[in-house]
Image (spheres, rainbow, N blue to C red):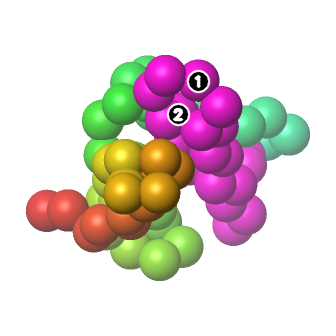
Amino acid sequence: MREYWLVDARGADVRFEILTEGDGTLTGSTDPNAPQESRVLGGRWQLSRTPNRAGRFDYRLDQTE
């Protein structure tokens, strides 16, 4: 099974999706803002972003229940 993790942090919100390949198509969650399920690593994952003192962003990837 193949899995593709997509992150787009260019806009005001971070877009994070885990897509899986099956039957020649890619499928993912219907809500890219919700925790994403990884069948390869197991569990659900959430990406967050917070501003730092340098005026840039820090990113954090957490495994959720």
Q: Residue at x 49, y 22 (%)?
A: 12
Q: Magenta part of the protein: which range? A: 1-22
Q: Is residue 43 visible?
A: yes
**Residue, disc 1:** 11
Q: Residue at x 47, y 77 (%)?
A: 41
Residue at far right of view? 24
Mark 1 lies on a secondary structure that is loop
Q: In the image, residue 18 lies at what x, y percent?
A: 56, 48
Q: Amino acid at mark 2?
A: Arg
* Residue 16 falls inside the magenta stretch: yes
* Residue 48 falls inside the magenta stretch: no
The quarter holding residue 59 reads: bottom left
Q: Main secondary structure of the magenta part?
A: strand
Near-viewer residue (8 or 54): 54
Mark 2 lies on a secondary structure that is strand
Q: In the image, residue 5 lies at what x, y percent?
A: 64, 54
Q: Residue at x 69, y 66 (%)?
A: 1
Rounded to the nearest angstrom, the CA distance separating label 1 from label 2 is: 9 Å
User: Mark number for residue 15?
Assistant: 2
Q: In the image, residue 42 lies at what x, y percent?
A: 38, 73
24 on left or right of 34? right
Residue at far bottom of view? 41
Q: Residue at x 20, y 62 (%)?
A: 64
Q: Amino acid at mark 1?
A: Gly
The quarter holding residue 63 reads: bottom left
Q: Are marks 1 and 2 in contact (CB under 8 Å)?
A: yes
User: Mark number for residue 61?
Assistant: none
Residue at far left of view? 65
